[in-house]
Amino acid sequence: NVLGYKVTSGMMTLSAGAAYSNGTETSVAVTFADLVEGLTIGAGTGNNNNVDLTTEDDIDTYFATYTMGSITVGAQKTSVDAETAAQDIERNSYGISMAVNENLSVSYGVSDTEFDESGLVDEENSGISASYTAGGMTLGVVHNQKENEAGTSATDREVTELKLTLAF
């Protein structure tokens, strides 16, 4: 139920996709890598139709990442223009990661989601992670927090995971 296409030429990658399951989704995106050394930028647009094809939401997203040495920073803005009145969504995300050495990496990210719908409050997310690799073993830890899940005040979530991966 999914059809996709991707082509890369020089510094540009163009992709398009369509999915047909519970409604239809279509999208197109373009990414430019290394226009300036270490900088990648991109944009995408798409739409999402519900199952009975009576409403269509338009989605736009823009991002940029910049890598200098062992540090990468990134930002993304996503907008959902809902056909249903007062249900638009705006999300801003930011992150930073650092390869401390060839075995240890750490990262931190945050995002804020603003809902247009009356009665909903902003959702705030943050997360930190670290991983250590030695030979065929990777040990990772992730801690994520979410405040006001889906715009519902005082609906908070928190999760911490410890992962061990072995490659044989």
Image: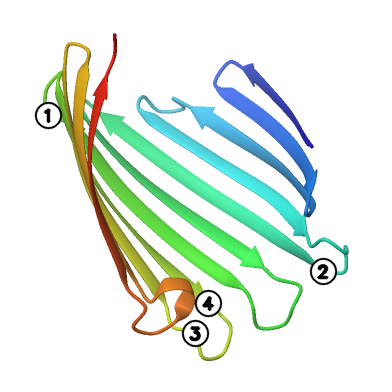
> Is the C terminus in the top left, top right, bottom left or bottom right quadrant?
top left
Are the residues tagged 1 and 4 within 8 Å (C-beta)?
A: no
Q: Which residue is mark 1?
A: 100
Which comes sooner in the sequence, label 2 or label 3? 2
Which comes sooner in the sequence, label 2 or label 4? 2
Are the residues tagged 4 and 3 within 8 Å (C-beta)?
A: yes
Cα gap from disc 1 to disc 2, whole angstroms: 47 Å
Which comes sooner in the sequence, label 1 or label 4? 1
Cα gap from disc 4 to disc 3, whole angstroms: 6 Å
Secondary structure beneath label 3: loop
Secondary structure beneath label 1: loop
Cα gap from disc 2 to disc 4, whole angstroms: 18 Å
Are the residues tagged 1 and 3 within 8 Å (C-beta)?
A: no
Cα gap from disc 1 to disc 3, whole angstroms: 40 Å
User: Which residue occupies the foreground of this view, 55 or 152?
Assistant: 152
The crowd level at tag 4 (other Cα within 10 Å; few <14, some 14-19, many 20+) is many
24 horizontally vs 162: left or right: right
Q: Is residue 167 above or below residue 56?
A: above
Q: Amino acid at mark 3?
A: Leu
Label disc, if present, on residue 120 of the rendered structure: 3
Q: Which residue is mark 4?
A: 115
The crowd level at tag 2 (other Cα within 10 Å; few <14, some 14-19, many 20+) is few
Q: Amino acid at mark 2?
A: Thr
Q: Amino acid at mark 4?
A: Phe
Q: Which picture quadrant has residue 118?
A: bottom right
Please give the name of the residue rendered at 42% of the width and 72% of the height, measured from the top-left corner. 149
